[in-house]
Image (tube, rainbow, N blue to C red):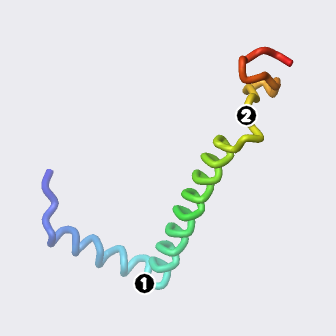
């Protein structure tokens, strides 16, 4: 299935007529903010995994030594 540039332009015009440029601008800004928040949360999650305060913890919450012996 091949979509030509004419078909894409027609779809774009229909979307602009249905939603208006102001609404599309708001949707774009909201989408950009959501992506930025997601990336920030992912970065914070990776930093939490690397932090030394979580070293030695298991998923169950039991604290173990570096040799994996229960304390």
Disc 1 + disc 2, Cβ < 8 Å: no
The tag earlier along the polypeptide, 1 or 2, is 1
Q: Which mark is residue 38?
A: none
Q: Quadrant of residue 41?
A: bottom right
Q: Secondary structure at mark 2?
A: loop
Q: Position of residue 43 (x, y in %)?
A: 58, 53
Q: Quadrant of residue 24?
A: bottom left
Q: CA distance from mark 1 to mark 2?
A: 51 Å
The number of numbered badges drawn on the structure is 2
Instruction: Please name the residue shown 74% across and 28% down the image.
Output: 56
Instruction: Please name the residue shown 15% across and 72% down the image.
Output: 6
Q: Position of residue 61 (x, y in %)?
A: 81, 28
Q: Secondary structure at mark 1?
A: helix
Query: Badge 1 local density, few (<14 within 10 Å), some, or many (20+)?
Result: few
Nearest-to-viewer mark from 1 and 2: 2
Instruction: Please name the residue shown 50% across and 72% down the image.
Output: 27
- Residue at image mark 2: 55
Relative to 68, 24 lies left or right: left
Q: Quadrant of the C terminus?
A: top right
Instruction: Please name the residue shown 16% across and 60% down the image.
Output: 3
Query: Badge 2 local density, few (<14 within 10 Å), some, or many (20+)?
Result: few
- Residue at image mark 1: 21
Q: Position of residue 58 (x, y in %)?
A: 74, 26
Rendered view: 65 above or below 14: above
Furthest toward the top, the residue is 69
């Amino acid at each position: 299935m091949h979509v030509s540039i004419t078909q894409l332009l027609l779809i774009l015009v229909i979307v602009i007529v249905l939603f208006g440029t102001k609404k599309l601008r708001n949707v774009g800004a909201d989408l950009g903010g959501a992506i930025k928040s997601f990336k920030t949360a992912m970065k914070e999650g990776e930093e939490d995994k690397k932090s030394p305060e979580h070293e030695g913890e298991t998923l169950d919450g039991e604290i173990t030594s570096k040799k994996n012996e229960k304390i």
